[in-house]
Amino acid sequence: MTVLHFALILAAAAFPPFAAVAQEVVAQENAAAGQSLVADSKNAVPAVPAPTAEVSPAPVKPVSIMMRGDIAMARKFYREAIDYFRSIRPEQALVWNKIGIAYHHLGEMDQARKAYERAIKLDKRYAEAINNLGTVHYARHSFRRAVSQYNKALKLSPHSAGMWSNLGTAWFARKNYAKASECYAKALELDPEVFEHRSTAGTLLQERSVAERAKFHFYLSKTYAQAGMNERALQYMRMALEEGFKERKRFVEDPEFAQMQELPEFKELLALQPRIL
């Protein structure tokens, strides 16, 4: 350490305001000599902290038109959502499918059909739009066409539980209960919650409107029983009976219910005469 350095350290100790000046002089000499500064807890001149720069808040990500449309859909402001989606350029199959869903919720099936067809024209392999076009045919009681559309969609997306459920419901509407059961079993295998979903959001419509509610719930009970999901089977069994399902003996005779025969809850439901809703 040079004499000058020592003198500066003493001055900094005696007169703290002088510390900053002393530090600057020492730094300049070291830099000139090509020395690197190393921390020395005993002899280092107290450092004066540099002023802290203000941290700017992260920029807010702008909300896109697509997001605004999705928010409007979630709030069930379907016409507002349609306006947002229609303003998106260039045209996209996804957007036209969403427009179709919005019209579908409004009950405007002609407009929904045109939107789905536009989506399919933009992307011929868009399984969700093909499925949703099937729901338009189903809503119009054109069940044969609905089955055809659902089968087309499943060729492109064979692992979609929602599409298998829709195909089952279309077969159910055509009173082909055996095929309906097969489709329901496949849907449940792919997604154990497929019949419990209630959200109206997304790009795939799942059809649940049926004329024979009691029989529909009987077949769901049967599907759950076959899958070993006894709690759900009992739930839909109760619903079927409350809605007036008349073939009570089928709960005893159909083999899918065999493993439930000794359950106390099962016996109680069969013994009850629930009030018909």
Image: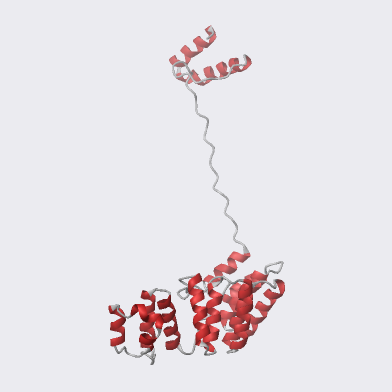
The residue that appears at 57% across and 84% down in the rendered structure is: 107
The image quarter containing residue 142 is bottom right
Location of the C terminus by quadrant is: bottom left
Q: Position of residue 165 (x, y in %)?
A: 52, 78
The residue that appears at 60% across and 58% down in the rendered structure is: 62
Residue at the farthest bottom position: 246
Residue 277 visible from this viewpoint: no
Q: Position of residue 170 (x, y in %)?
A: 55, 84
Towards the viewer: 149 or 226: 226
Going by the image, does 251 lie left or right of 124? left
The image quarter containing residue 203 is bottom right
Q: How is the image coloured?
A: secondary structure
The residue that appears at 51% across and 83% down in the rendered structure is: 180
Towards the viewer: 44 or 171: 171
Q: Position of residue 248 (x, y in %)?
A: 36, 90
Going by the image, does 112 lie left or right of 225? right
Towards the viewer: 191 or 9: 191
Towards the viewer: 47 or 220: 220
The image quarter containing residue 240 is bottom left
Q: How many labels, in total? A: 0
Q: Is residue 208 above or below residue 199?
A: below
Q: Position of residue 251 (x, y in %)?
A: 37, 85
